[in-house]
Image (cartoon, rainbow, N blue to C red):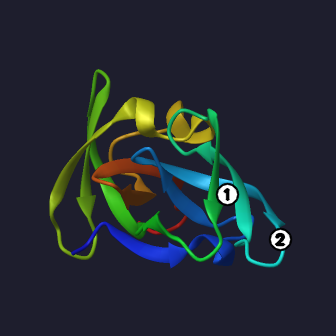
Amino acid sequence: MSEIKLAHAGSLRAGSYILIDGAPCIVKDTQTSRPGKHGHAKVRIKATDMFTGSTKEIVKPGHDNVEVPIIYKKNGQLLSITGDNMEIMDMETFETLAASLAMADEEVRDKLEAGQTVLFWQVTGKIVVKQIVQGAE
């Protein structure tokens, strides 16, 4: 399975995803400038890194391809939490995945317990726990 796909820079909108310097980011704002007669439209993309929260900005011609990460959203059972690591079993494939507790969203990090069903995202080879699924047990 490919981890990325290509999209035109001009097709990105707020809420889209993009890879900037290899880091998956959420697009917060795009601005398009249309220069003179023989120029190409330029797109200024402002985005926030999904993992660190830092703001990144790039400028690309609107017709250029940019890399967009493919995000797999899955349910899994939290098998164990050991120190800063956790093990999650994918509910579709029953595959056991190792993840860092630091990669969980701040809202759910302190509420995680073994045996819970969680929604997690697989993006660029990393696993991010997004939320606890209620009543899925």
Residue count near mark 2 (Cα–Cα under 10 Å), binned few <14, some 14–19, many ≥20: few
Q: In which quarter of the image is residue 36?
A: bottom right
Tag of residue 101 = none
Which quadrant holds the C terminus?
A: bottom left
Q: Residue at position x 83%, y 65% from top?
A: 33
Q: Which amino acid does label 2 sit on?
A: Arg
SS assignment at label 2:
loop
Judge by depth and name the residue closer to the eye, 68 or 99. 68
Q: Residue at position x 73%, y 71% from top?
A: 39
Q: What residue type is labelled 1?
A: Val
Lower position in the chain sequence, tag 1 or tag 2: 1
- Measuring from the top left, give residue 15's x and y in whole percent: 69, 64
Residue placed farthest to the left in the image?
95
Q: Distance between the residues labelled 1 and 2?
A: 20 Å
Disc 1 vs disc 2: which is toward the camera? 2
Residue count near mark 1 (Cα–Cα under 10 Å), binned few <14, some 14–19, many ≥20: many
Judge by depth and name the residue closer to the eye, 49 or 134. 49
- Image position of 109 with respect to 76: above or below: above
Q: In which quarter of the image is residue 106?
A: top right
In the visual, does 80 lie left or right of 136? Answer: left
Q: Residue at position x 69%, y 55% from top?
A: 45
Q: What residue is disc 1 on?
A: 27
Tag of residue 34 = 2
In the visual, does 99 lie left or right of 71? Answer: left
